[in-house]
């Protein structure tokens, strides 16, 4: 009898506890509903639109694109870059497209700007924008991967304090960082505060060109106001980052997509077999010490053209609905002229089934 009473009491307590939990759960649901009650961003149907702009290059080895807001009106502007690599000295050539539409086409463009890329046998180029010297005005990193026989180097320059036209107040000296491999096809640069200490870090990467192509990278932590770092870490070849073995250039983008203080990384390769190209995309998360975790397999997206000599990727809220969107760009070679070709995927979201970050295409 005593046992039954005790058991009864235990059951009562358990039932009371469960009821309390239920109430708690209901409260949580109610407050979650309140958040969900906010009007959802209107997602207008948007077709995938392929934009084409002249790339103003002839023998291109690498290209990229960066979204920023140079004229300060809240509408993303794009900076388009190629590394023109004839025999002899190579040149960066870039221009700005102001105030792009929801599908990425600029309302107007600047003239072309040209500056030495401090390399002569380039394989790949990258662009990144961020406020390195912390004065509230965006700064520009232009990267070339110099790949002569023997040791290869990342060589970059920083244009500090861009005006609305995309011209910097001054350029840094060329900054050289030993390369990550000797047989590169493609390189990329991205800026973010990877170790979350309030100072920007520069991710420099290249793609190791062999049958088991691999992504290799370094991080230049905490760039100073002259644009260089005294703490560069080499992460070598990263296993599980095979994108293909006919990759022509790569692009990278960093953004903290889930708000946990760690940067998500997009690695985009332009796979260039005979015939139609494709974008191949791996996503990962970069830990504050610079290691990659949650590295996905590659997902293939529609390519642009049959000969991509440059690849770019950049993240911004292009349709201004409060979600981040991603732009994939190829610098496409034709016998006559070279073009930037690109499109946007919207509202980057975590796909728990494929364990990768993915945009939507309506
Ligand atoms: Ca703008
Ligand atoms: Ca600045
Ligand atoms: Ca930092
Ligand atoms: Ca958006």
Image (spheres, grey):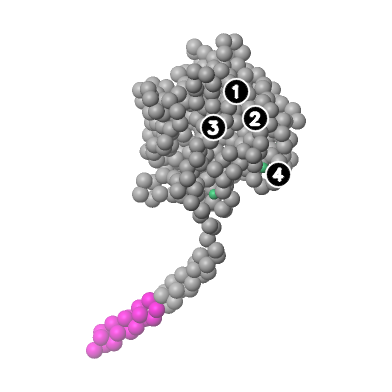
- Ligand 1 under 8 Å from disc 4 Cβ: yes
Q: Do callouts 1 and 2 mark residues in contact (Cβ within 8 Å)?
A: yes
Left or right: 304 with respect to 211? right
Q: What is the distance, in whole Å, between disc 1 and disc 2 at their CAs?
A: 10 Å
Q: What is the distance, in whole Å, between disc 4 and disc 2 at their CAs?
A: 17 Å
Residue annotated with mark 1: 56
Give the magenta-colored segment's residue range: 1-19
Residue at position x 49%, y 68% in the image = 33
Left or right: 57 with respect to 239? right
Residue annotated with mark 3: 52
Residue annotated with mark 2: 95
Queried whether the magenta region covers residue 6, the answer comes back as yes
Q: Earlier in the sequence, mark 3 or mark 4?
A: 3
Q: Earlier in the sequence, mark 3 or mark 2?
A: 3
Residue annotated with mark 4: 72
Q: Earlier in the sequence, mark 1 or mark 2?
A: 1
- Ligand 1 under 8 Å from disc 2 Cβ: no
Crowd tier of the residue under label 2, counting other residues whose Cα lies within 10 Å: few below 14, some 14–19, many 20 or above: many
Quadrant where ligand 1 appears = top right
Q: Is the stretch drawn in magenta largely helix, strand or loop?
A: helix
């Amino acid at each position: 009898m005593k046992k039954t009473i005790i058991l009864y009491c235990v059951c009562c307590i358990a039932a009371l506890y469960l009821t309390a939990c239920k109430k708690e759960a209901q409260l949580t649901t109610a407050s979650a509903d309140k958040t969900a009650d906010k009007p959802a961003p209107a997602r207008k149907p948007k077709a995938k639109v392929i934009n084409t702009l002249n790339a103003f290059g002839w023998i291109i080895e690498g290209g990229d694109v960066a979204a920023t807001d140079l004229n300060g009106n809240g509408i993303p502007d794009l900076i388009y870059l190629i590394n023109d690599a004839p025999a002899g000295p190579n040149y960066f050539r870039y221009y700005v497209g102001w105030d792009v539409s929801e599908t990425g086409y600029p309302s107007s463009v600047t003239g072309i700007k040209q500056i030495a890329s401090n390399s002569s046998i380039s394989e790949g180029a990258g662009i990144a924008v961020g406020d390195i010297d912390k004065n509230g005005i965006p700064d520009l990193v232009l990267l070339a991967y110099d790949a002569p026989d023997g040791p290869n180097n990342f060589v970059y320059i920083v244009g500090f304090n861009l005006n609305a036209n995309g011209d910097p107040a001054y350029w840094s000296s060329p900054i050289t960082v030993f390369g990550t491999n000797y047989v590169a096809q493609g390189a990329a640069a991205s800026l973010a505060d990877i170790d979350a200490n309030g100072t920007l870090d520069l991710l420099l990467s290249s793609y190791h060109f062999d049958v088991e192509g691999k992504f290799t990278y370094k991080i230049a932590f905490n760039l100073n106001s002259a644009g260089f770092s005294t703490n560069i870490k080499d992460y070598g070849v990263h296993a599980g980052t095979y994108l293909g073995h006919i990759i022509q250039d790569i692009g990278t983008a960093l953004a903290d997509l889930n708000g946990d203080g760690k940067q998500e990384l997009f690695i985009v390769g332009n796979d260039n077999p005979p015939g139609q190209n494709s974008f191949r995309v791996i996503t990962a998360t970069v830990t504050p010490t610079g290691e990659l975790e949650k590295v996905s397999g590659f997902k293939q997206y529609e390519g642009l053209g049959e000969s991509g000599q440059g690849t770019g990727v950049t993240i911004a809220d292009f349709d201004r609905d409060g979600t981040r969107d991603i732009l994939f760009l190829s610098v496409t070679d034709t016998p006559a002229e070279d073009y930037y070709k690109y499109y946007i995927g919207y509202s980057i979201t975590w796909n728990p089934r494929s364990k990768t970050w993915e945009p939507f295409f309506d």
